[in-house]
Image (cartoon, grey):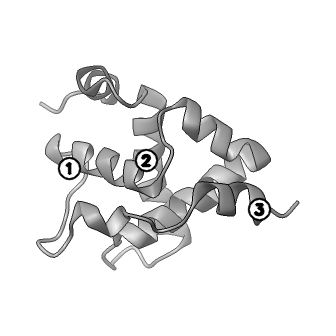
């Protein structure tokens, strides 16, 4: 039986349960809104979906919310994804790597500087 997301967060200790739930929710969002459901979602695709979802949910406060939850870079998204993969909540292709999430975008740039009302 899979562990609950809250249990995974508590075991990990670095990211809040909300952060882990957000990344998991972002997978579904990315599948529906950004790419075809039958295509493989890359780390870059998921980061883009998470960016859009965060802005939809929290607008100009997106970076603050993510930071409070322990997410400060796209690399943090990758760490959460690989935690979820380890616990069978997500899966990866053999060509996927955690490095796919490194430096996809800068949070300050996309959530502050480029933010449009």
Q: Residue at x 23, y 22 (%)?
A: 11
Where is mark 3, residue-wise? 113
In this orientation, which residue lies closer to the viewer: 73 or 2?
73
Quadrant where the image shows the C terminus: bottom right
In front: mark 3 or mark 2? Answer: 3
Q: Earlier in the sequence, mark 3 or mark 1?
A: 1
Label 1: which secondary element: helix
Label 3: which secondary element: helix
Give the x, y percent position of residue 21: 43, 37
Q: CA distance from mark 3 to mark 1?
A: 32 Å
Where is mark 2, residue-wise? 23
**Image quadrant in which you'd find residue 95:** bottom left
Q: Residue at x 76, y 66 (%)?
A: 114
Residue 85, labelled with which disc? 1
Give the x, y percent position of residue 36: 43, 79
Q: CA distance from mark 1 to mark 2?
A: 12 Å
Give the x, y percent position of residue 35: 47, 77
User: Pointer 3: residues within 10 angstroms few (<14), some, or many (20+)?
Assistant: few
Task: Specify whether 46 is left or right of 100.
Answer: right
């Amino acid at each position: 039986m899979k562990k609950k997301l809250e249990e995974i967060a508590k075991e990990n200790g670095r990211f809040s349960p909300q952060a882990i739930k957000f990344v998991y929710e972002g997978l579904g969002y990315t599948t529906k809104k950004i790419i075809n459901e039958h295509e493989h979602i890359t780390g870059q695709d998921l980061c883009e979906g998470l960016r859009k979802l965060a802005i939809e949910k929290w607008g100009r406060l997106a970076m603050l919310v993510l930071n409070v939850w322990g997410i400060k870079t796209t690399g943090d998204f990758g760490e959460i994804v690989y935690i979820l993969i380890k616990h069978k909540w997500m899966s990866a292709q053999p060509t996927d790597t955690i490095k796919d999430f490194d430096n996809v975008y800068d949070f300050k740039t996309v959530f502050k500087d480029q933010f449009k009302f």
